[in-house]
């Protein structure tokens, strides 16, 4: 298994993040994406807001053996903090998302933490369960990457 570490997001990470967000196969699996993942101006504006720290957003770049492979973070108000993560499709199936989320959870003492996943995104659901999140509900939401409303699983990590 690769050594997974987290660090602050750097300017050089953004072209990689954009390329990954523009991967139609990966966004279909993730389901819940920006309106147009290929809109670079919107992407840059979104990441400028994220990196400003406004709104309590905390994001970290994920490295595996020193190579940038994704990002992980949290956003939202106290009591409703949501975790999010993205691992480049070329690195799926290696346990990197689980290791990255665990490392992020070690960095933050905030609990509860919540997450949502497309009900059919079994990989993401397994990552969350391995990190201690438990299913607390279900919902339906519009998945832009699929152009339709889909089932979601809601999960929570308590103290």
Image (cartoon, rainbow, N blue to C red):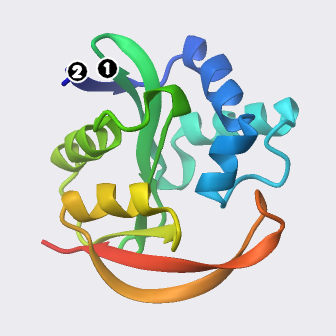
Q: Nearer the viewer, residue 32 or 75?
A: 32
Q: Quadrant of the N terminus?
A: top left
Q: CA distance from mark 1 to mark 2?
A: 6 Å
Q: Does residue 149 sit above or below 5 in this rendering?
A: below
**6 left or right of 146?**
left
State which quadrant residue 16 falls in: top right
Mark number for residue 97? none
Q: Residue at x 16, y 45 (%)?
A: 106
Q: Quadrant of the C terminus?
A: bottom left
Q: Nearer the viewer, residue 112 or 139?
A: 139
Mark number for residue 2? 2
| Residue 37 at x, y percent in the picture | 79, 42
Q: Does residue 50 sit above or below 1 in this rendering?
A: below
Q: Are marks 1 and 2 in contact (CB under 8 Å)?
A: yes
Mark number for residue 64? 1
| Residue 94 at x, y percent in the picture | 31, 33
**75 left or right of 101?**
right
First in sequence, mark 1 or 2: give its number.
2
């Amino acid at each position: 298994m690769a050594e997974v570490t987290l660090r602050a997001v750097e300017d050089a990470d953004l072209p990689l993040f954009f390329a990954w967000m523009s991967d139609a196969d990966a966004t279909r699996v993730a389901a819940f994406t920006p309106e147009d993942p290929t809109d670079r101006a919107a992407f840059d504006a979104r990441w400028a807001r994220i990196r400003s720290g406004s709104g309590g957003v905390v994001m970290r770049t994920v490295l595996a053996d020193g190579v940038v492979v994704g990002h992980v973070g949290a956003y939202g108000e106290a009591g409703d903090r949501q975790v999010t993560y993205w691992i480049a499709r070329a690195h799926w199936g290696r346990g990197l998302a689980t290791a990255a989320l665990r490392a992020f959870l070690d960095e933050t003492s905030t609990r509860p933490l919540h997450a949502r996943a497309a009900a059919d995104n079994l990989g993401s659901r397994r990552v969350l369960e391995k990190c201690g999140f438990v299913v607390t509900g279900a919902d339906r939401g519009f998945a832009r990457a699929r152009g339709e409303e889909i089932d979601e699983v809601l999960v929570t990590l308590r103290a």
